[in-house]
Image (cartoon, rainbow, N blue to C red):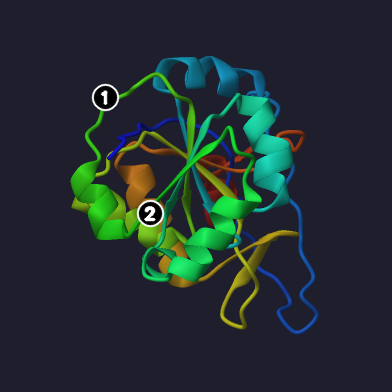
Amino acid sequence: MSAVQANRHGAVLIIPVDNENRACAVIEKDSETSSGDWLLLNLNMDETFVRIDNRLVHGQILEGWVPFLGVSRIVVVDDEVAGDIFRETVIKMAVPYDIEVIVFSVDEFACDYHYGDNDGKRAIILFQNIADAHRAYRLGFRFGELNIGNIHFESDRVCCSSSIYLNRKDIADLEFLAGEGVHIELRSVPRDRPVEFISVMKKIDS
């Protein structure tokens, strides 16, 4: 089975919200925050883009990130998809023929992946939620960069952007990863400005 690797991208923005109206405040990117150019430079080193997206494979991935990063492999890490041949087939049918698609359960992925084992293909690794990425990390999948792209609204979540809502467990998991040295950003599509998790947390705590 093919192995892949890990790298830096995306952004996290956490702010209180009126959940009843689902109104979002916006924290502007700090002036020192890097532009998207460093994303490609870093990808040249690690070849892999790790993203959390509750929709997994969809238009933002296929029409945005795949051409922007020059990706030739998509790795879906999700227990439900790995256990549902119909969902796996639908995902593979939606992806262009020249893009390789691999589906793993979280445990299988963490066991089979070996850092630095790279066959030269640029890859996107997709987790459906923060808990799964956090679990994979604890099981041995070490990555240095994490992109938060889409996390859907639920009543216990606060609004972080128009497409990202986090609950207390999400924030705790991200703080753990940040404490381990993982660089975390929020960005839905390549044209968005990245907002760094650490800088946002400093503003919230102040």
**Image coordinates for residue 140, horizontal then vertical, percent:** 20, 46
* Residue of label 2: 133
The three-letter amino acid code for the residue at tag 1 is: Gly
First-in-chain label (1 vs 2) = 1
Crowding near the residue tagged with mark 1, few <14, some 14–19, many ≥20 C-alpha atoms within 10 Å = few
| Viewer-side label of 1, 2 | 1
Query: On the image, which quarter does residue 99 sit in?
Result: top right
Query: Where residue 116 is drawn, which disc sits there?
Result: 1
When asked about the image quadrant of residue 183, the answer is top left
Residue located at (65% from left, 18% from top): 37
Query: Which x, y percent locates residue 158?
Result: 62, 70
In-image side of 133 versus 140 (left or right): right
Location of residue 75 in the rendering, given as x and y in whole percent from the top left corner: 44, 45
Residue drawn at the location 70% of the way across and 71% of the way down: 17
Label 1 close to label 2 by CB (< 8 Å): no
The picture places residue 124, in percent across and down from the top left corner, at 50, 38
Q: Amino acid at mark 2?
A: Ala
Q: Secondary structure at mark 1?
A: loop
Along the line of sight, the residue nearer the viewer: 182 or 108: 108
Image vertical order of residue 91 relative to residue 87, above or below: above
Instruction: Pick the quarter of the image with the N terminus.
Output: top left
- Badge 2 density bin: few <14, some 14–19, many ≥20, Cα 10 Å: many
Visible in this render: residue 206? no
Q: CA distance from mark 1 to mark 2?
A: 18 Å
